[in-house]
Amino acid sequence: LSLTDVVVSDLSRGTPQGELVQGWKDQDTLAKWESTSWAKKLAAKKRRASLTDFDRFKVVLLKKQKSKLIAEKVNAIKF
């Protein structure tokens, strides 16, 4: 169990489920959670796990292109 800063406020202990769900929707708690870095990391991890071999290959090619562009810019600044 891990606690976060995302809170459904104005609810007391023992609140019925219907009121909790309504408070969850009214305060847009899910959107607050999805905007946290923790949720973004989990989403990225899930996305990486669902990649196919060809998708992973495309990622490798894109990383190579990115590093090549960065190296060219750095070398242009050095000289």
Image (cartoon, grey):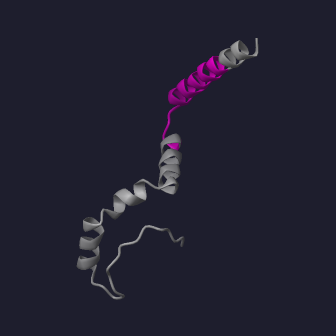
Which corner quadrant holds the C terminus?
top right
Q: Whole-percent x and y of residue 19?
A: 24, 78
78 lies left or right of 58: right
Image height check: is 12 above or below 20?
below
> Which of these two is toward me, 74 or 45?
74
Range drawn in magenta: 49-70
Residue 17 percent coordinates (x, y): 28, 79
Q: Residue at 60% across / 26% down in the picture?
A: 63
Residue furthest to the right: 79
Residue 58 pos. (x, y %): 53, 24
**Residue at image x 50%, y 45%?**
44
Residue at figure coordinates x 65%, y 23% from the top left: 67
62 horizontally vs 75: left or right: left
Q: Please say whether residue 27 is one of the residues in the magenta stretch.
A: no
For residue 30, above or below residue 73: below
Q: Toward which corner of the image does residue 74 lie, by quadrant?
A: top right
Reply yes or no: does residue 64 show up in magenta.
yes
Residue at 27% x, 72% y is 23
In this figure, what is the number of numbered marks?
0
**Could you tell me which quadrant the N terminus lies in?**
bottom right
Q: Nearer the viewer, residue 30 or 52?
A: 30
In which quadrant of the rendered view does residue 22 lie?
A: bottom left
